[in-house]
Amino acid sequence: MSLIIKVDPINFKPEDLFPAAEVIKKGGTVAFPTETVYGLGADAFNGNACLKIFKIKKRQPDNPLIVHISSFEQLYNVASEVKNEDKLKKVWPGPLTVVLKKKPSVPKEVTAGLDTVAVRMPAHPVALKLIEISGTPIAAPSANISGKPSPTSGKTVIEELNGLADVIIDAGETFFGVESTIVDITRDPPVLLRPGPFTVEELRSIFTSIKVPPEVSGLYDFEKPLAPGMKYKHYAPEKDLYLLLDNSSLPEIIKKIDKRVAVLVTEENYEKIKDLASKNVTFIILGTESNLYTVAKNLFEALRKIDKLDVEFGIIQSFKEEGIGLAIMNRIRKASGRKFITSYPF
Ligand code: AMP
Ligand code: MG
């Protein structure tokens, strides 16, 4: 059994986190909330402690971890050439990870042998306080078994990692629900590696020349993966998920469904099709078209729900690739294993 610490995400006492900080200092593992998704963390300067993360998650050793910091002092301890410090001061704490040249003191287990390190200062009060009182940066990928959707609630982390992580801090739901944006700032111009809650539109106001490669759509893999983890299967439910390319065909498709199917749509689309569906259809409402942050927040729990329901497979609608919509489409293209449909049956 893991030690489970339940806290309010905002109104908690630092003392509540002391047992978790002790575990980090002693080389153990702690699952903790960030504003994006839950992370499974260990002392970033302790290679053996970080190896435990790979073992628990069944993560491939060539898939590096993100180092989470609570101060700029810690940044200078992990990165050798800190570029764009003024810009980082504007964006942190926040859901943006940057890739920088690493210091030799960062163990190879964390960076999968690369000479770069991915760093982020998270904007979740519990994460920041945990890092601060642990007195060390915390290396942490998402707190899921590799391949599964990232956990966005303490309840899901407990279901997945109880007995595997030494400590699980349950602070309820995370705020954004999709993983951080990653930008490689060792390159000139900087390159977007993973779209996330820090949107391209926002990035352009900070890194004006940023390159947005076509691969961030999730339509195809990086030929030579710029970010090593990108080549792995991600976010996928165990059951098949099909991505509908054109939402205008939803009514026609819903009328024809003759199998037990989960249909993942926004409130607006649900209103349009709910009266056309047979009892075979179970709707999972993702959020509202008028604010796609609601969809991002619910997305991974919705994907997990497909496996829990008595359905054969899932169908998910598509989204406009603007703002957070780019991150949503990246995740659902990958979650569907790029099984795209335009009609039913397919
Ligand atoms: P996760 O937090 O589970 O999404 O995993 C962290 C992801 O960050 C990895 O899968 C990589 O894609 C990315 N990453 C970590 N370190 C680096 C690095 N040095 N260079 C490029 N990408 C990185
Ligand atoms: Mg992950």
Image (cartoon, rainbow, N blue to C red):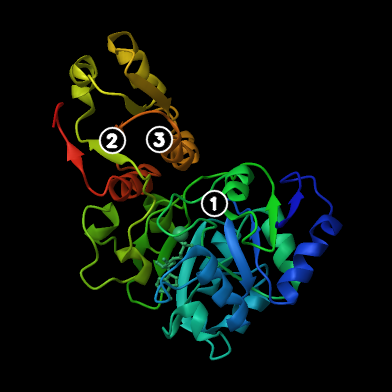
Q: Position of residue 271 (x, y in %)?
A: 36, 14
Residue at the farthest bottom position: 104
In whole angstroms, how far apart are the C-alphas of marks 1 and 2?
22 Å
Query: In this orientation, does residue 167 appear?
Result: yes
In the visual, does 32 lie left or right of 87? right
Q: Position of residue 17 (x, y in %)?
A: 79, 59
At 22% from the left edge and 20% from the top edge, which residue is drawn? 257
Q: Which residue is mark 1?
A: 37
Q: Residues within 10 Å of mark 1 (few under 14, many from 20)?
A: many
In whole angstroms, how far apart are the C-alphas of marks 3 and 2?
17 Å
Q: Which residue is mark 2?
A: 318
Please report whichever mark, 1 or 2, sits nearer to the chain's N-terminal start: 1
Of residue 164 and residue 4, the one placed in the foreground of this image is: 164
Above or below residue 110? Residue 296 is above
At 65% from the left edge and 67% from the top edge, which residue is drawn? 29
Q: Which residue is mark 3?
A: 306
Q: Residues within 10 Å of mark 3 (few under 14, many from 20)?
A: many
Look at the image and tell me in which quarter the N terminus lies: bottom right
Q: Amino acid at mark 2?
A: Ser
Please report whichever mark, 3 or 2, sits nearer to the chain's N-terminal start: 3
In the visual, does 88 lie left or right of 238? right
